[in-house]
Image (tube, grey):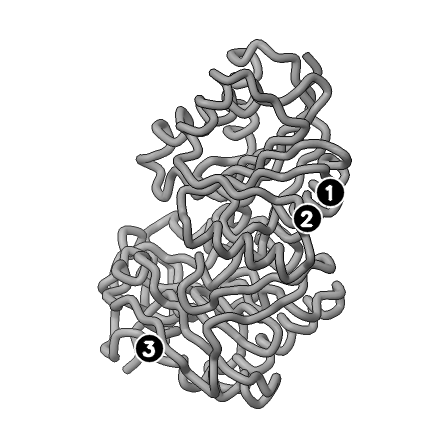
Amino acid sequence: MAYEVYLKKNEEKRIMDGHSWVYSNEVARIEGKDKNGELATVYDYSGRFIGKGYINHASKILVRIFIRHNEEDGEELYRTRIAAANAYRQALGYTNAYRMVFAEADGLPALIIDKYADILVMQCLSLGIDKRKGMIVKILTELFSPKGIYERSDVAVRAKEGLPEVKQVLYGEVPDWVEIEENGVKMLVDVKNGQKTGYFLDQKENRFAVRRYARGGEVLDCFSNSGGFSLNAALTAQKVYAADISAFALENVRRNAECNGISNIETVCGDVFTLLREYKAQGRKFDLVVLDPPAFCKSAAEVRDAYRGYKDINILGMKLVKNGGFLATCSCSHYMTLPLFEKMLIEAAKESGRTVRSVEIKSQAPDHPALLCAEETQYLKFFVLQVLG
């Protein structure tokens, strides 16, 4: 008999509103017996049907609901949802490189699929999805005929599901580097060892946006990674300095610049916090400073320390901007909410002693849609600020 999960009283509202996650501490009782990772039916305390999802007793997220009506779990459901997710991206004009499936936002919790030219990269972040990746690969090959499919399930969150970290070829042949085109710029993506699934696709619109603020000036791109912001800025700027602590990342910046015939980027290897303090001591100023750091907090318990880190680096960034210049600043942690991030920027402006105004506020690209009922899916903040004096 399949598992039947009954919630405690008054624990159903968030889930009835559309959130997928059922936490183990919200459950009153479980009836039936089945294998871990199989389909379970979730009911409220009174026995009213809520939905179905895969169960995992090893995880604090006991069930991830993805069936709300009369659909049957299986190949046809996955085929329909993956095809619909891809059609949505294509309707927006994405063709070469984009997020094809974004987990809960596309009705397939814990499944990430990114497209890099003719290579697909997959992440399986729950036990239920991991058990079905063979079926998912079959669907992807039939729908899209990729040259290769690579799994990048080398993420720490898998440990919470009782799963090991995995990187492997799932289908076809996957080269070490895949050339994509984004905003008319060629990029070499390291799908096997690069950040996330190889590249930060969620910033594509924001990288394009910096071109107008870089026009004719000197740009400092901090935490440059493989150079997405640097290359876009270099198309309009006089000079770009790409700063990162990783020599490997900076070598990729140089390779990407060479692919595009761009010669006005200089790489700077070092700790960004130290580098910014050195530039301040030297009296250096830039027309545009880009701050795109890694997530400073990956849990709610880390928010306070992360807030201080974000404020510190933004104060430094503001102090390095010429009068009338711009600061483009980001956070990719959903725990650093938009109101909290904006509050931090207001405090940073006051403490920097500069007069600062907000010019543009953006989020993740439309191929990373967010569910209004699930704040975790709305995670990226991108502010462009002008420093007036």
Note whether residue 323 is visible: yes
Could you give the CA–CA distance between mark 1 and mark 2, rounded to whole angstroms?
6 Å
Percent x, y for residue 328?
62, 34
Q: Amino acid at mark 1?
A: Arg
Residue corresponding to mark 3: 38
- Helix, strand or loop for disc 2: helix
* Relative height, residue 99 to residue 318 (above, below): below
Note whether residue 49 is visible: no
- Could you tell whether 13 is left or right of 31 in the image? right
The answer to which quarter of the image holds residue 95 is bottom right
* Relative height, residue 64 to residue 216 (above, below): below
Could you give the CA–CA distance between mark 3 and mark 1, rounded to whole angstroms?
48 Å
Percent x, y for residue 102?
54, 63
Percent x, y for residue 9?
35, 50
Q: Amino acid at mark 2?
A: Asn
Residue corresponding to mark 2: 232
The residue carrying pointer 3 sits among few (fewer than 14), some (14 to 19) or many (20 or more) residues within 10 Å by Cα, namely some
Could you give the CA–CA distance between mark 3 and mark 2, rounded to whole angstroms?
45 Å
Q: Along the polypeptide, which appears first: circle 3 or circle 1?
A: 3
Q: Which mark is residue 200?
A: none
Q: Pointers 3 and 2 in contact (CB under 8 A)?
A: no
Q: Along the polypeptide, which appears first: circle 3 or circle 2?
A: 3
Residue corresponding to mark 1: 211
